[in-house]
């Protein structure tokens, strides 16, 4: 049998993983050897007789765990994009092992003692050293043995509760589904949709995991809308108890780690840093958002002839949107052909801004025949890295779109980046792949992450590319969306797939006009969820909550965001992001990133837009830095000032 391909570095260009050689049976042995080798390396670092230096401790840690790193990178990439029963089994088995593995390193006292003694005068080293210290302290390295024991217990219970929370929700989406006997009650939905809901002579509309069910925009029967809405906000009541328990445990864990509450713990290593900074930003948004939502509610009431209830909002908003903006999103599709969107849109914008060029490498392959590989060159012709594109939906691929790295750029290993974008576009059985406007936008967004990875020019893998705080990482990708409708770029890629004619200007104008519509609603439902997340995670240790629903209502009122026609995007009992998705005290990140995004878009516009000099400035100050410097310092170096909220309010039409 051939040697396991994970045991040695790849011999392919850019160390692209050798997907042709990797078999499912290679993963487990590679994980096992990878973890064992990594632990042995860490033991050797921790047990060294030499005085601790940056090189023999921090850089040595950066150099350790190569087999594990290669294996995990490929495994989790394939498990997300092209999984199988076997891979799912492996994932279930290795996930807890990886958690224990990382605890074994971060709670290693000898190692921690050495890290604390390392000093350095080099700024990039000093920044990395600080990251290591933060990581270890946040994982509990400074605690006594009994405290670490308690911490492990808390982590274990929290992880169990979080699984329970999401399983309850999965059940609730069908258990709380809207069931009607008569298809006439579903009037407004299209006929094919209604047919697909039929089960045993009745009609079952399952809940999506969001308050405002999309069907509310179409259902003409007001009472059916009310029932659907009430099912939506009333689902999984059992989760209120779990949420209280989790919030309480998180507060206790924060206290153990020396923080006043969980939110303070979470933001300490984010760009926000303090709860005060987050609260100041949210506080500035609440007033304008609620004012706008109230004005929108009045306009809708005028249309409806009665005061708007939450189950009426989307229905009347849709009526107003059609009347006022009259555009058919499907009319755009023939102008958005996948290959052309990338070549003449996504890539073209990058060429005009940064001078980079793309050459397809059909000789290199991914884990699936639909994956395309491109080599990326700098303006002077030097090689920059590889970009892999996996555009299509398939069984075994998770929903949504994302970017991931297959090889992290670092000078330490002399490795160039290999980055990947995954989209979920339906593959046509024949003919060209035509995208929706949202899919085009997503393609530019994900490629913004890809550029962040490709332009990385840092020494250490730990801080390579997109290894930046969660409240910062969406910022460069959001900025890249600005080129979707930039006139020269749009004219370049949005051409009819048969005739080659450019997209009619009025379609674009209608689209831009419609984008500002209903922003009061969207901002309030988002902020209400954010402030709910915040309230749960500002609980003081030991503070008791007896009635979760009353707590929820009081939190919204205290924050000034309670406006009954626009409920939070998620209520506590189905707020997956924060109780089962790693975003606790982090839901604010989306709008925090958007503040920086709006500031940056404004900078590009002030400075002449799509120009090489502008691209170079953004690349030099921001994209190339990865997480190797304070992210807000790179923002300031790029923008020339502190971020302010004005451009965001302007963009959302909230002024
Ligand atoms: Zn993103």
Image: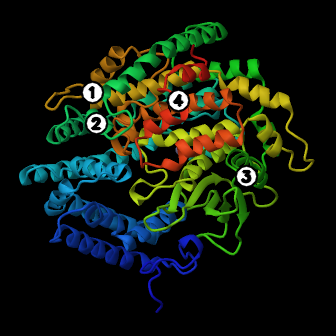
Pick whichever of labels 1 and 2 is earlier in the sequence. 2
Foreground residue, 30 or 311?
30
In contact (CB < 8 Å): disc 1 and disc 2: yes
Nearer to us: label 4 or label 3: 4
Residue 129: % across, % down: 29, 52
Q: Quadrant of residue 313?
A: top right
Report crowding for label 4: few under 14, some 14 to 19, many 20 or more residues within 10 A (C-alpha): few
Give the Cα distance between marks 1 and 3.
Answer: 48 Å
**Residue that numbered label 4 is attached to:** 640
Nearer to us: label 1 or label 3: 3
Residue 117, placed above or below residue 539: below
**Residue that numbered label 2 is attached to:** 243
Nearer to us: label 4 or label 2: 4
Give the numbered dot on residue 449: none
Pick whichever of labels 4 and 3 is earlier in the sequence. 3
Task: Describe the element under mark 1 as helix, strand or loop.
Answer: helix
Residue that appears at 36% across and 73% down: 31
Residue that appears at 64% across and 20% down: 317
Give the numbered dot on residue 548: 1
Report crowding for label 1: few under 14, some 14 to 19, many 20 or more residues within 10 A (C-alpha): some
In contact (CB < 8 Å): disc 3 and disc 2: no
Report crowding for label 2: few under 14, some 14 to 19, many 20 or more residues within 10 A (C-alpha): many
**Residue that numbered label 3 is attached to:** 342
Task: Describe the element under mark 2 as helix, strand or loop.
Answer: helix
Pick whichever of labels 1 and 4 is earlier in the sequence. 1
Give the Cα distance between marks 3 and 2.
Answer: 43 Å
Residue that appears at 22% across and 58% down: 106
Q: Residue furthest right?
A: 499
């Amino acid at each position: 049998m051939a040697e396991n391909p994970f045991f040695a570095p790849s011999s392919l260009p850019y160390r692209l993983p050798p997907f042709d050689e990797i078999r499912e049976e290679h993963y487990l042995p590679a994980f096992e050897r990878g973890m064992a080798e990594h632990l042995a390396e860490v033991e050797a670092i921790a047990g060294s007789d030499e005085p601790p230096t940056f090189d023999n401790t921090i850089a040595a840690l950066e150099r350790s765990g190569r087999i594990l790193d290669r294996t995990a990178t490929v495994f989790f990439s394939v498990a997300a994009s092209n999984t199988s029963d076997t891979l799912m089994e492996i994932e279930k088995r290795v996930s807890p092992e990886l958690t224990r593995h990382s605890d074994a390193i971060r709670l290693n006292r000898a190692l921690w003692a050495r890290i604390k003694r390392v000093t350095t005068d080099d700024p990039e080293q000093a920044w990395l050293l600080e990251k290591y210290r933060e990581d270890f302290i946040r994982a509990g390295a400074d605690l006594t043995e009994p405290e670490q024991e308690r911490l492990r217990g808390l982590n274990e219970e929290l992880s169990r509760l979080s699984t329970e929370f999401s399983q309850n929700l999965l059940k609730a989406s069908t258990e709380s589904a809207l069931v009607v006997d008569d298809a006439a009650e579903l009037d407004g939905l299209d006929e094919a949709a209604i047919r697909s809901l039929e089960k045993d002579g009745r009609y079952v509309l399952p809940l999506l995991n969001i308050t405002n069910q999309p069907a509310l925009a179409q259902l003409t029967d007001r009472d059916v809308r009310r029932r659907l809405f009430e099912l939506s906000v009333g689902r999984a009541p059992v989760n209120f108890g779990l949420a209280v328990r989790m919030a309480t445990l998180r507060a206790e864990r924060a206290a153990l780690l020396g923080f006043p509450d969980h939110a303070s713990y979470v933001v300490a290593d984010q760009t926000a840093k303090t709860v005060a900074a987050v609260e100041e930003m949210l506080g500035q948004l609440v007033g304008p958002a609620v004012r706008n939502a109230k004005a929108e509610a009045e306009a809708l009431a005028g249309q409806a002839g009665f005061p708007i209830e939450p189950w009426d909002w989307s229905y009347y908003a849709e009526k107003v949107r059609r009347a006022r903006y009259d555009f058919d999103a499907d009319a755009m599709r023939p102008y958005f052909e996948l290959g052309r969107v990338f070549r003449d849109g996504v890539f073209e914008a990058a060429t005009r801004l940064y001078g980079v060029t793309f050459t397809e490498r059909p000789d290199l392959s991914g884990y699936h025949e639909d994956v395309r590989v491109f080599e990326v060159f700098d303006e002077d012709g030097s090689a920059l890295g590889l970009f892999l594109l996996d555009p299509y939906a398939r069984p075994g691929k998770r929903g949504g779109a994302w970017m991931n790295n297959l090889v992290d750029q670092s000078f330490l290993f002399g490795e160039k980046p290999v980055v990947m974008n995954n989209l979920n576009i339906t593959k046509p059985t024949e003919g060209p792949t035509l995208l929706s406007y949202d899919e085009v936008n997503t393609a530019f967004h994900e490629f913004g992450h890809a550029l962040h990875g490709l332009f990385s020019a840092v020494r250490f893998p730990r801080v390579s590319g997109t290894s930046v705080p969660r409240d910062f990482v969406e910022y460069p990708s959001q900025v890249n969306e600005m080129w979707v409708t930039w006139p020269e770029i749009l004219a370049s890629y949005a051409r009819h797939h048969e005739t080659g004619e450019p997209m009619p200007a009025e379609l674009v104008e209608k689209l831009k006009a419609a984008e500002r519509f209903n922003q009061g609603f969207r901002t309030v439902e988002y902020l209400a969820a954010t402030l709910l997340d915040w309230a749960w995670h500002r609980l003081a240790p030991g503070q008791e909550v007896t009635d979760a629903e009353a707590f929820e209502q009081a939190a919204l009122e205290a924050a000034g965001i309670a406006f009954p026609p626009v409920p939070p995007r998620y209520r506590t009992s189905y707020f997956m992001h924060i109780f089962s998705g790693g975003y606790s005290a982090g839901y604010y990140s989306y709008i925090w990133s958007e503040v920086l995004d709006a500031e940056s878009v404004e900078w590009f516009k002030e400075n002449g837009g799509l120009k090489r000099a502008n691209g170079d400035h953004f690349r030099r100050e921001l994209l190339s830095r990865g997480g190797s410097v304070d992210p807000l310092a790179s923002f300031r170096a790029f923008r020339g000032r502190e971020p302010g909220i004005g451009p965001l309010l302007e963009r959302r039409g909230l002024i």
